[in-house]
Image (spheres, rainbow, N blue to C red):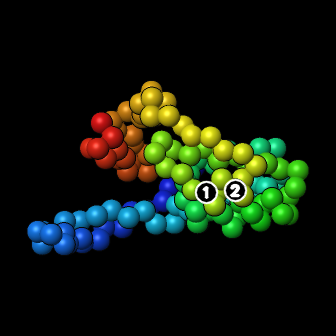
C-alpha cells in the first residue's frame, strides 16, 4: 500500500478576506501511474480497476493500452465525479454510488504500522 502526502496551503476568501488552511494531496496520481505501469509490465493483472476521476491519469492509462494490449483498465468514478478524457481512454467505466461509500467507510481512526494515526475528514462523517 502506498500513501500520498498532503500539503497545507493558506487560502484567502475573496469575499470576506478570511484565511484558512487548505489541504492539497501530492504524489497520489504519480504513485498510481507508476504502480499501474509496473503491474502491467509484470503482467500482474488482466483487468486493473482504477478508482479515480483524475484526468492526470489519462497518459499512463493510454500508455498501458498501447504497450500491453491484452490488459484492460476499467475506471470506477467516485460519486459526483467524472472525467470524459479518462472514460474515453479506459476500456470501460462506471460510477460508484454514494451508498456504496457509506457502507465501506473505514473506522474513525486507523493506526499504520509506523504509529501514524489516520483519520477521515470531518465532512466524511
The quarter holding residue 120 reads top left
Q: Secondary structure at mark 1?
A: helix
**Side of 89 relative to 54 (left or right):** right
At x 79%, y 55%, the residue is: 40
Q: Secondary structure at mark 2?
A: helix
Q: In the displayed structure, would residue 42 be above or below residue 66?
A: above
Q: CA distance from mark 1 to mark 2?
A: 6 Å
State the residue in front, 37 or 12.
Answer: 12
Crowding at dot 2, Cα within 10 Å, few <14 / some 14-19 / many 20+, comes out as few
Residue 125 in the image: x percent, y percent?
A: 30, 36
- Residue for badge 2: 88
Q: Is residue 2 visible?
A: no
- Residue for badge 1: 84
Q: Is residue 94 visible?
A: yes
Marks 2 and 1: in contact by CB < 8 Å?
A: yes
Residue 10 in the image: x percent, y percent?
A: 24, 72
At x 55%, y 59%, the residue is: 54
Amino acid at each position: 500500500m502506498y500513501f500520498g502526502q498532503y500539503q497545507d496551503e493558506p487560502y484567502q476568501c475573496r469575499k470576506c478576506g478570511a484565511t484558512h488552511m487548505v489541504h492539497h494531496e501530492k504524489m497520489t496520481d504519480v504513485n498510481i501511474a507508476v504502480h499501474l505501469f509496473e503491474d502491467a509490465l509484470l503482467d500482474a493483472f488482466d483487468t486493473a480497476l482504477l478508482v479515480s476521476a483524475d484526468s492526470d491519469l489519462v497518459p499512463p492509462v493510454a500508455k498501458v493500452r498501447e504497450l500491453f494490449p491484452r490488459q484492460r483498465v476499467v475506471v470506477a468514478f467516485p460519486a459526483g465525479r467524472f472525467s470524459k478524457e479518462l472514460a474515453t481512454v479506459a476500456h470501460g467505466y462506471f460510477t460508484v454510488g454514494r451508498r456504496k461509500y457509506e457502507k465501506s467507510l473505514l473506522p474513525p481512526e486507523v493506526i499504520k504500522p509506523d504509529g501514524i494515526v489516520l483519520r477521515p475528514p470531518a465532512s466524511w462523517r
